[in-house]
Image: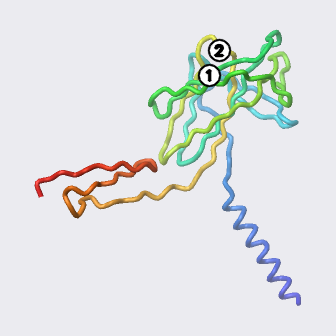
Amino acid sequence: MKKIQLIILILIFAVSGVFAQSAKKTKALKPTKYTKRLSTTVSEKTRYYYSLSTETPSIINIQGPGKLNVITRGRFEPKHEGNINYEIHYTIDGGELQVKKFNNVSRSKDATYVKGSLGVPGRSMDFDIELDRGYHNIEFKIIIGSVPVAVRYLFTATKKKKQDWIAYCPSQPSEPVDIISREESISYYRFSKD
């Protein structure tokens, strides 16, 4: 009887160990450049947010593939009334400028700044950036005249996707060739003298 209990106990530990290893781990990232770190209390837990600047970009360096979750909070000055609007500009690997707009953001009911003189943080607004394989450099800024915005970065690594390879030379000269890139399939027609 003791042997059966011991075997069952070992199986329970083995199964729980496998599930613990397979769970996706999310980690908070600290940018390499930032203007100021703000301590924000959310549901009695202190979280660090990093202020965005109009001049100096906040830079995140990360190795993909994975999903970068960008959590933003606009800041309400002590005398500010109503809701706020803001937009975040970012580039991935020096590419095209992308803009994420947030409109009618209200004051947060469950978050406060550790230093109350900063005002009141806005409601948490977030967006995701999907990253492919390789090293990535992502720069974040706000526009001139925008309300102060603080950001928190969470990265969840994902498994590498297998690449599908297709025949380089189709069997017939006029047969379409499929090129698969970033999960999109594009058909091209091959013309040759053969």
Identify the mark nearer the N-term, 1 or 2: 1
Indicate the quadrant where residue 123 lies. top right
Image quadrant assignment for residue 27:
top right
Disc 1 packing (10 Å; few <14; some 14–19; many ≥20): some
Q: Which residue is mark 2?
A: 146
Q: Residue at x 75, y 26 (%)?
A: 38
150 shown above or below 135: above
Residue 132 is situated, as x and y percent measured from the top left of the image, at 49, 46
Side (left or right) of 137 relative to 28: left
Identify the residue at the far left of this view: 193
Residue 87's disc is 1
State how far apart marks 1 and 2 are (Cα).
8 Å
Mark 2 Cα shell of 10 Å, populated few (<14), some (14-19), many (≥20): some
Q: Mark 1 belongs to which amino acid?
A: Glu
Q: What quarter of the picture does the N terminus occupy?
A: bottom right
Residue at 49% x, 43% y is 135
Which residue type carries mark 2?
Answer: Ser
The residue nearer to you, when weighing 191 against 179, is: 191
Residue at x 53% of width, y 46% of height:
64
Asked if the residue at tag 2 contacts the one at tag 1, i.e. Cβ–Cβ closer than 8 Å, the answer is: yes
Location of residue 112 in the rendering, given as x and y in whole percent from the top left corner = 84, 26
| Secondary structure found at label 1 | strand
Residue 144 lies left or right of residue 172; in this view the side is right
